[in-house]
Amino acid sequence: MAVPKKKTSKKRQRDRRSQAHGKAVVRESAVCSNCSAKVMPHRICPTCGYYKGRKIIAKLV
């Protein structure tokens, strides 16, 4: 079984864990099937309140 010879320093641990922090995450937006607005995927549409063709939230106009 492999055992580390020396203790891993805090800086080395943090550098290893922080690889994803520098990368920009680009999320693709979906289109609402009801009002054709841009929506985050798998979310209720904030403009009309629909999700997958069903009315989830009653919006006040």
Image (cartoon, grey):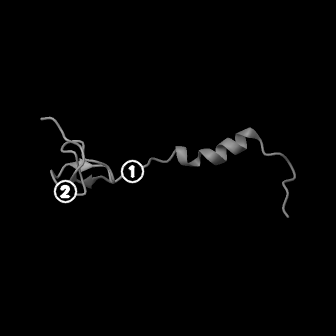
Q: Amino acid at mark 1?
A: Val
User: Which residue appears at 58% of the width and 48% of the height?
Assistant: 19
**x%, y% of residue 55?**
20, 50
- Picture layout, residue 8 above or below residue 4: above
Sequence order check, earlier mark of 2 and 1: 1
Residue 41 horizontal side relative to residue 16, left or right:
left
Please rate how many residues cluster around mark 2, counting C-alpha atoms within 10 Å: few if below 14, some from 14 to 19, many from 20. some
Disc count in the image? 2
Q: Nearer the viewer, mark 2 or mark 1?
A: 2
The residue indicated by pointer 2 is 33
- In terms of secondary structure, where does tag 1 sit? loop
At which x and y percent is residue 41?
A: 33, 53
Amino acid at the residue labelled 2 = Ser
Could you tell me which quadrant the C terminus lies in?
A: top left
Return the residue found at the far right: 5
The residue tagged with tag 2: helix, strand or loop? Answer: loop
What residue is at 25 percent from the left and 57 percent from the top? 52
Where does label 1 land, which residue?
26
Q: Quadrant of the N terminus?
A: bottom right
